Image (tube, helix red, strand yellow):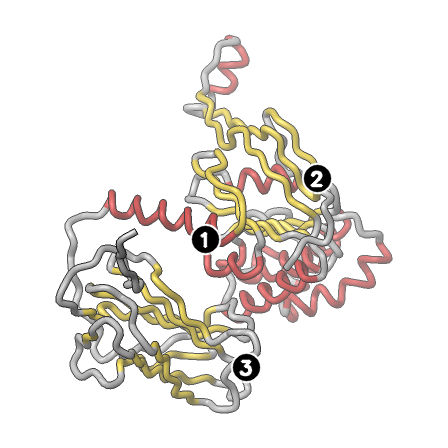
């Protein structure tokens, strides 16, 4: 997806946000009376700089407490920066904290009309779009029930339906979709993809790194309120994953090995497609082994409730420490998804294994037709054991030779 214009939709310059933290409910009043500070200052954002083009999707990533939600609130206009400058050009629609902007005693329909009006729609526009917003939320008769009776998933359905159907130029989504069911998550992701493809500007905060890589062109990594990296999504995500891996190593307790899964049999999943079996072919036993350069074949069996549902299959090859060494997806250009049967038996074949000596894990996934939404995921520990007469550093063997200059 490419940007449709070089004009800035969002631009942050030295953006800083401080919060005052008081030790108790009376401290604020005491500070006002005595004119002496009774608070600590927490800097949630520290001189953040970035520029987002119109028609561009940007992912905001980072650990909990990194400042992601604070940044999105500033862009949405919910909060004001302590210092610095923020430029926003375009009508904004935002999905922030669960239930924010909804009055619990109002019905879903009343909240729909109120939020649409706050987003700038006229009364005539609200009347025209109300049926489509209500239908897309799939709340049925609950649309006329008080929001206090809604589940968290129902609140997100209504909020997302309003936010994406009022013709925003800039859409802000802060991890809200994580509380929805699988069906609604896929439906929402499809809508966000279509929004960006049609020229919309998206700021999306999520911990699902595989997802943001699919439809966000650039990523902004925040760490302790500062910009740790900003650039192409793939590069920033790799840096972030390396950072997380290093933290896991530092915090790891003495290793406790668990038994490898028996024969790769997976349990039931709740989604519409389920992985049933993943097993190595041509290699007997629970700990199959290969030598570098040998062919590897895995059989993957999965089922779906709807034979016409298009399904892609993916796999991640990972080191013992969790580093992704390689990925294998059927969602390649020109390759159709699997469909037409309720049960599929497919084979992943690696013609020549390039790995050096060691033990490797595999994660198998069932994906939707775009390769974005995960229907099911299964993990195989010690899926591939590579044996060799000598030890090489790294993960892969690259052919080479030394010659005399």
Considering the numbered disc 2 on the image, is that residue within a helix, a strand or a loop? strand
Q: Residue at x 68, y 46 (%)?
A: 53
Q: Residue at x 38, y 71 (%)?
A: 315
Residue 283: quadrant of the picture: bottom left
Residue 207's tag is: 1
Q: Label 2: how many residues lie within 10 Å, few (<14), some (14-19) or many (20+)? A: some
Q: Where does label 3 land, which residue? A: 336
> Which one is closest to the eye, mark 2 or mark 3?
3
- Which one is nearer the viewer's eye here, 112 or 110? 112
* Distance of label 2 from label 3 (alpha carbons): 40 Å
Q: Earlier in the sequence, mark 1 or mark 2?
A: 2
Q: Position of residue 343 (x, y in %)?
A: 42, 89
Q: Position of residue 161 (x, y in %)?
A: 66, 61
Determine if residue 74 is in view: yes
> Which one is closest to the eye, mark 3 or mark 1?
3
Q: Position of residue 30 (x, y in %)?
A: 49, 14
Q: Pick out the residue farthest to the left.
A: 389
- Which one is nearer the viewer's eye here, 193 or 1? 1
- Which one is nearer the viewer's eye here, 304 or 32? 304
* Distance of label 3 from label 1 (alpha carbons): 28 Å
Residue 88's tag is: 2
Determine if residue 102 is in view: no
């Amino acid at each position: 997806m490419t940007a449709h214009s070089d004009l800035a939709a969002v631009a942050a310059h030295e953006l800083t946000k401080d919060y005052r933290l008081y030790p108790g409910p009376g401290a604020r009043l005491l500070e006002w009376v005595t004119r002496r500070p009774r608070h600590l200052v927490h800097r949630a954002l520290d001189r953040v700089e970035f520029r987002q083009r119109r028609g561009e999707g940007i992912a905001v990533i980072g650990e909990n407490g990194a400042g992601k939600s604070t940044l999105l609130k500033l862009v949405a206009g919910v909060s004001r920066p302590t210092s610095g400058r923020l430029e926003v050009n375009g009508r904004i629609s935002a999905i922030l904290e669960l239930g924010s902007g909804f009055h619990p005693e109002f019905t879903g329909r009343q909240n729909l009309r109120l939020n649409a009006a706050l987003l700038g729609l006229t009364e005539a526009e609200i009347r025209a779009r109300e049926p489509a917003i209500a239908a897309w939320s799939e709340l049925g008769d609950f649309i006329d029930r008080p929001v206090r009776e809604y589940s968290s998933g129902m609140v997100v359905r209504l909020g997302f339906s309003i936010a994406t159907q009022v013709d925003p130029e800039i859409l802000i989504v802060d991890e809200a979709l994580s509380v929805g069911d699988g069906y609604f998550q896929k439906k929402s992701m499809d809508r966000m993809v279509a929004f960006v493809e049609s020229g919309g500007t998206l700021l999306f905060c999520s911990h699902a790194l595989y997802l943001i890589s699919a439809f966000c062109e650039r990523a902004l990594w925040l760490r302790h309120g500062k910009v740790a990296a900003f650039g192409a999504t793939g590069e920033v995500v790799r840096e972030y994953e390396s950072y997380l891996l290093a933290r896991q190593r530092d915090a790891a307790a003495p290793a406790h090995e668990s038994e490898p899964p028996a024969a790769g049999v997976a349990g039931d999943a709740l989604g519409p497609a389920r992985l049933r079996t993943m097993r190595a072919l041509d290699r007997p036993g629970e700990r199959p082994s290969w030598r570098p350069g040998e062919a590897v074949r895995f059989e993957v069996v999965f089922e779906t409730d709807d034979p016409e549902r298009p399904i892609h299959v993916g796999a991640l090859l990972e080191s013992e420490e969790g580093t992704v060494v390689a990925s294998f997806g059927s969602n390649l250009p020109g390759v159709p998804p699997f469909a037409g049967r309720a049960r599929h038996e497919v084979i992943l074949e690696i013609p020549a294994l390039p790995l050096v000596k060691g033990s490797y894990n595999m994660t198998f996934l069932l994906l939707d037709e775009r390769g974005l939404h995960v229907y099911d995921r299964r993990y195989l520990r010690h899926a591939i054991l590579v044996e060799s007469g000598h030890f090489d550093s790294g993960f892969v063997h690259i052919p080479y030779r030394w010659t005399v200059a």
